[in-house]
Amino acid sequence: MTIPVHQLSDPTVRDFVTALNANDRSALFGLLAPGVTMSDDGSDREVGDWLDREVFSSNGHMDVESETGGGRELVATYRNDTWGAMRTAWRFTVEGGKVARFETGQA
């Protein structure tokens, strides 16, 4: 069972998932704090390059299965045209309504 995106608890995370699923580059980048950082499977990545490769050029999409940590920790089925579908964990650090860091990896 998935959680409808509009029901996600944290408004910034909800907007992040909405923008990602809509492949809306300007909305997603607008949610990122200056100096945002991220990691994928424990390795830090350059955010812009990662988003281009894993989301925008490959039609990334998240179906959220569960949330904890006030809505800032998600388990989701993530799929894109490069890797197919996989169960992933996401953790967001939100400061002042912007994503300051996000971490993702296989769940």
Image: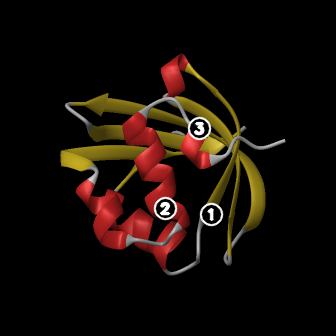
Who's the residue at 67% across and 76% down the image? Answer: 82
Residue picked out by circle 1: 61
Q: Position of residue 6 (x, y in %)?
A: 55, 45
Residue picked out by circle 2: 20
Name the residue nearer the viewer: 52 or 9: 9
Q: Position of residue 56 (x, y in %)?
A: 47, 75
User: Mark 2 or mark 1, which has the lower sequence index?
Assistant: 2
In whole angstroms, how far apart are the C-alphas of marks 1 and 3? 17 Å
29 left or right of 35 in image:
right
Which residue in the rendered view is the most extreme toward the left? 34
State if disc 3 and disc 1 touch (CB < 8 Å): no
Q: Residues within 10 Å of mark 3 (few under 14, many from 20)?
A: few
Q: Residues within 10 Å of mark 1 (few under 14, many from 20)?
A: many
Name the quarter where the C terminus is drawn: top right
State if disc 1 and disc 2 touch (CB < 8 Å): yes
Up-down: is 28 above or below 59? above
60 left or right of 24 in image:
right
Q: Position of residue 22 (x, y in %)?
A: 51, 69
Q: Looking at numbered disc 3 in the image, what kind of residue is underneath it?
A: Gln
Residue 3: quadrant of the picture: top right
In whole angstroms, how far apart are the C-alphas of marks 3 and 2? 16 Å
Q: Looking at numbered disc 2 in the image, what kind of residue is underneath it?
A: Leu
Residue 41 in view of the camera? no
Residue picked out by circle 3: 7
Who's the residue at 61% across and 43% down the image? Answer: 105
